[in-house]
Amino acid sequence: MVEQEQAAFVLHSRPYRENQQIVELLTQHNGKVAAITYVSHSTKSSKKSLLQPFLPISVVLSGASSLQKLTRVEALAKSYLLEKERLYSAFYINELLVRLLPEHQESPALFTLYQESLLALTNEQTVELVLRAFEIQLLEELGQTIDFSLLEALSTEYIHYVPDTGFQLSNDTNKHLPRYNWLDMQAIASGELSSSAVRQSYKKLMRQIINHLLGGQPLNSRKLFS
């Protein structure tokens, strides 16, 4: 990777060796990147205070391996102020990126959406709509676009969604999967999300697909909501 200064956000960090951390970053130009950095244990450490989630930072990365070296970090703006459900939602977005987004997959659009999502959460926009918008874009980045055009060929009250295949009529092979109201799915496809029933169906659909991508492994951030 050629050294370049770029905007970034910390998604997650963990201790590595003495006075070292591995920091997972969402970067403007290189997607998700894991980087190693030296951090003083002192509470007055300026670098430690900068490597916090939801703080816009500028970073310089170097190294030829998959584990980069964080050579410089500076704050670009104040941290997004998030509390309670909105903070938990932001942690949920971070965990989705950590768990699902491949490293070094360039996606300036996803980086922009991440910033817009944090801003929307601070601006009192409806949390569930912010999350659904982010989830659907992330699925597209992962090649998991939902083909709602399949609904036109299905004329029944309830249908199933089969991961990696799409919407189907109920049969013996998919009847164990969640079922969805056909009208709710049509409303989602049209962006008509004013109904609480439609929003609940949308949440259930996203959860089914994301759980499939996670291989059934739970998300720690979901526990915060309870």
Image: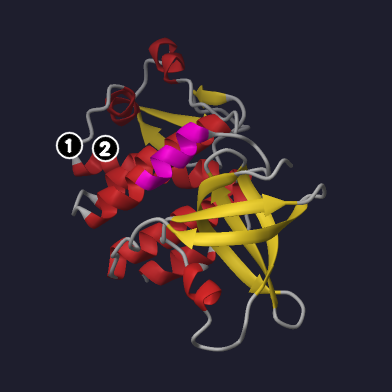
Placement of 158 over or under 40, stated as above or below: above
List x then y, in percent, for residue 63. 78, 51
Using residue 37 as the reference point, say whether residue 196 is left or right of it. Answer: left
Say which residue label 1 marks: 194
Q: Residue most toward the right?
A: 65
Between marks 1 and 2 in the image, the one whose residue lies nearer the viewer: 1
Pointers 1 and 2 in contact (C-beta within 8 Å): yes
Q: Taken as a whole, is the magenta stretch helix, strand or loop?
A: helix
Using residue 177 as the reference point, say whether residue 213 is left or right of it. Answer: right
Please tell me whether mark 2 sits on a helix, a strand or a loop: helix
Q: How many marks?
A: 2
Q: Which mark is residue 78?
A: none
Q: Is residue 214 visible?
A: no
Say which residue label 2 marks: 198
Please tell me whether mark 1 sits on a helix, a strand or a loop: loop
Residue at (62, 40) in percent of width and height: 30
Q: Gap in Å between the C-alphas at discs 1 and 2?
A: 8 Å
User: For residue 110: magenta?
Assistant: yes
In this view of the protein, which residue sits in the foreground, 79 or 179?
79
**Tag 1: residue type?**
Ser
Residue at (52, 30) in percent of width and height: 140
Q: Which of the image's four quarters has the N terminus?
A: top right
Q: Which residues are magenta?
A: 108-115
Residue at (43, 10) in percent of width and height: 153
Residue at (54, 75) in percent of width and height: 48
Q: Which of the image's four quarters has the C terminus?
A: bottom left
Q: Residues within 10 Å of mark 2 (few under 14, many from 20)?
A: many
In this view of the protein, which residue sits in the foreground, 199 or 30?
30
